[in-house]
Amino acid sequence: MTGIARTAKTVLISGASIAGPALALWLHRYGFAPTVVERAPELRTGGYKVDLRGGAIEICRRMGILDEVRAHSTDMDGGSYVDSRGRTVGELPAEIFGGREEQDDEIMRGDLARILYERTRDDVEYLFGDSIAALDDDGDGVDVTFESGNRRRFDLVVGADGLHSNTRRLVFGDERRFKRHLGAYISIFTAPNRLGLTRWETYHARPDKLISVYSTAGEGAHTAKNCFVFAAPAELTYDHRDTDAQKRLLADAFAGDDWEIPRLIADSAHADDFYFDSVATIEMDRWSRGRVVLLGDAAHCTSPASGQGTGLALTGAYVLAGELAAAGGDHAAAFAAYEEVMRPGVELNQRFAASFAKEMTVSSRWKIALRMFMVRTLPKTPWKNLIAKKIREEIQKAANAVPVKDYATFETV
Ligand SMILES: Cc1cc2nc3c(=O)[nH]c(=O)nc-3n(C[C@H](O)[C@H](O)[C@H](O)COP(=O)(O)OP(=O)(O)OC[C@H]3O[C@@H](n4cnc5c(N)ncnc54)[C@H](O)[C@@H]3O)c2cc1C
């Protein structure tokens, strides 16, 4: 191989959720020495059920985790909409409106994070409860100072630290320059299974709000996930690390609402996996500077509205590691190739997210009534298969927007 600028061996990855451990798995396989630093004191297991479709499924297969992913499938039967009195006003069978092809699957974010962590923890150094405080890229390597006070030097640094990426802030500047708020907030947490659900999701729509409660195959009889979406045209001001403040914002947004909402919200008080964030994208002109590169949501969050954030995190990890191995350590060439492969698919998914975010909630009672009418009648129409096919095609376009290239499996770099 020609044109090798330098052999990169040590890689610091900030963030141990999906993108970080997935990258560590591939880098270790290619002969790099990855270290993952995670701000949380232990692996974070909360979050929504996430779709794995198209290219992401193929990448799970290549990672050797597909059987385990399948074993943790949410295996949902479907969902129904209920009105304020709890009466069912429409049903959505999973096979029609899930938009999935046969090979696609759905898994809890926390289960996937745990699978990736368990697959890598014997080969990869994990530093929990720490964070990068400062970075100094001198062209030959990156000197990193951690919040703990430790200092180390790495060949490369990867920011896989999510929507509110610390690495992005340190290297590219304030989050506000890159974040596009899509007009809604989302919250989810584990709670008692108050609606007695089994592999079923119950939705309740109110003007500018959507509540869903579900219990997956792995959840067991006693717990469920309570999920809340509410429209907010302007961004709310709060500290994204202050969980109590976020719980108050959620309670305020749903104050005075009926159905089961008061007790579903009250359960947040006891949730230790409470998640709250804006539905937002991260849009940047470039994802790398010098020896530092961004990955997953840190680089290009597509928001929960896209349904592809986790798939793209897995795909990005596969592509970044593959390009680094293929470039024989020429990180500049690898970062450029990684971005070239990923960007068109990412931008397609961001466009998809921006339009779908507007559909997450509806603004008036009559629009809710119209939506309920469609939910009720569509499964009975003769065109239901045609409509389901159309939905599936759109989703598959987004899920296969990044090509899954074959990369050589170098033992060493
Ligand atoms: C607990 C949790 C719950 C989630 N729930 C949902 C959900 O319900 N719906 C949804 O659509 N998406 C959710 N997400 C986001 C979803 O996981 C991502 O959109 C997607 O999987 C891409 O993953 P990622 O690894 O790029 O980023 P993320 O999954 O956001 O992971 C970023 C990781 O970096 C860590 N981190 C943050 N700051 C630092 C720092 N300074 N130093 C070191 N580490 C840091 C975080 O703790 C986290 O582990 C959730 C993320 C987390 C962490």
Image (cartoon, grey):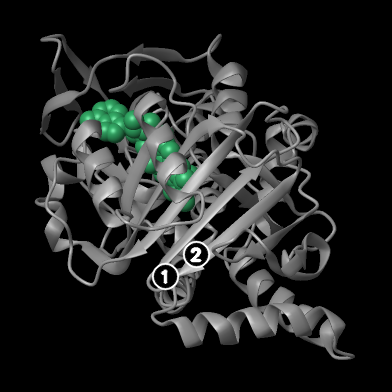
Please give left or right for residue 226 compared with residue 76 in the image: left
Rendered image quadrant of residue 412? top right
**Residue drawn at (20%, 61%) of the image:** 178
**Residue drawn at (28%, 56%) of the image:** 253
Q: Position of residue 101 (x, y in %)?
A: 80, 63
Rendered image quadrant of residue 401? bottom right
Q: Quadrant of ligand 1?
A: top left
Q: Which residue is mark 2?
A: 306
Secondary structure type for disc 2: helix
Rendered image quadrant of residue 282? bottom left
Task: Answer above or below: position of 319 versus 378.
Answer: above
**Residue drawn at (42%, 70%) of the image:** 350
**Farthest right residue in view:** 382
Q: Amino acid at mark 2?
A: Ser
Q: Which residue is mark 1?
A: 350
Secondary structure type for disc 1: helix
The reply to whether discs 1 and 2 touch (Cβ–Cβ < 8 Å) is: yes
**Residue drawn at (70%, 62%) of the image:** 80
**Label 2 crowd (10 A; few <14 / some 14-19 / many >=20):** many
